[in-house]
Image: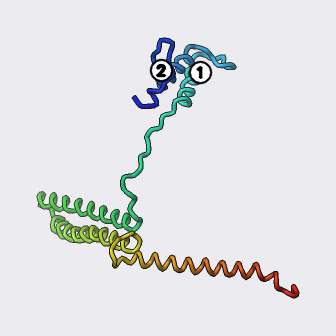
Amino acid sequence: MGTAERRGASRAGGARLTEHQKVEAADRDSFEGVAEPGEQETGVLTREAGRGARERQYHRPLWVEEPARRRRLPDPVRTAAVRAVLLIAVTLVQAMVAFLCTLAGSWPAFPMVISSVVSTIAATWGALDVWVTRQVWNQRNGVVSVPSSTARALRRERRRTRRQERAAERAQERIRRRSGAGQLSHS
């Protein structure tokens, strides 16, 4: 029982009525054969109307979003990770097929073993690619507290160019404002 359910209006006998019980009671009241104004049909329509009213009154979401525990991977790193997972999956399938072909003694056994070896090398490269891509991204864009980090120098350079752009814009604005004041003629 959640906090919202514990907060209910008190009844005459002092018992607490939860929100869920209120909705169910309202549903039962609307099902009791009381047709809504303008509806002269059987009780089926009344039940359908009551069901719609219940859904409108007590809307419980299917899931509750929780904040992520870890940040999302940067795009290049995520792409490399997906590539590595696909390579590893293909390698495992090839190794299994090579093993089964070897047990069965069929002719594709040798080519499958050779391709499994090549795929293993490619999968290892894929896993290393994820690691290298992550390190490069952290070095370029991340906040790495290492004195040799290029991210800090790049950030400094970007700040310097932004300051220069803003100073140039301010100077242009000053020139535009003063241009009308000291002119002798408009031609």
In the image, residue 95 lies at what x, y percent?
19, 62
Q: Depth check: give the residue in front, 9 or 19.
A: 9
Work out whether mark 2 precedes mark 1 in sequence or the reverse, and give the earlier one. Answer: 2
Q: Residue at x 61, y 14 (%)?
A: 34
The way the protein has been coloured in the rendering is: rainbow
Residue 112 position (above or below residue 24): below
Indicate the amino acid at tag 2: Leu
Q: How many marks?
A: 2
Residue 183's label in the rendered image is none
Q: Depth check: give the residue in front, 139 or 40.
A: 139
Residue 130 position (above or below residue 49): below
The quarter of the image holding the N terminus is top left
In the image, residue 125 lies at what x, y percent?
26, 71
Residue 106 position (above or below residue 146): above
Instruction: Answer with left or right where residue 54 lies relative to residue 63.
Output: right
Residue 17's label in the rendered image is 2
Provide the secondary structure element on which disc 2 rests. Answer: strand
Instruction: Answer with left or right where residue 17 lies relative to residue 125.
Output: right
Provide the secondary structure element on which disc 1 rests. Answer: helix
| Inter-mark Cα distance, 2 to 1 | 28 Å
Instruction: Answer with left or right where residue 133 lies relative to residue 9.
Output: left
Residue linked to disc 1: 45
Q: Residue at x 47, y 37 (%)?
A: 61
Select label 2 or label 1 by which is in front. Answer: 2
Instruction: Answer with left or right where residue 74 lies relative to residue 86.
Output: right
The quarter of the image holding the C terminus is bottom right
Occupied quadrant, residue 63: top left
Q: Depth check: give the residue in front, 30 or 74.
A: 74
Indicate the amino acid at tag 1: Leu
Q: Depth check: give the residue in front, 139 or 185.
A: 185
In the image, residue 165 lies at what x, y percent?
59, 79
Q: Badge 2: few (under 14), some or many (20 or more) residues near its Cα, within 10 Å?
A: some
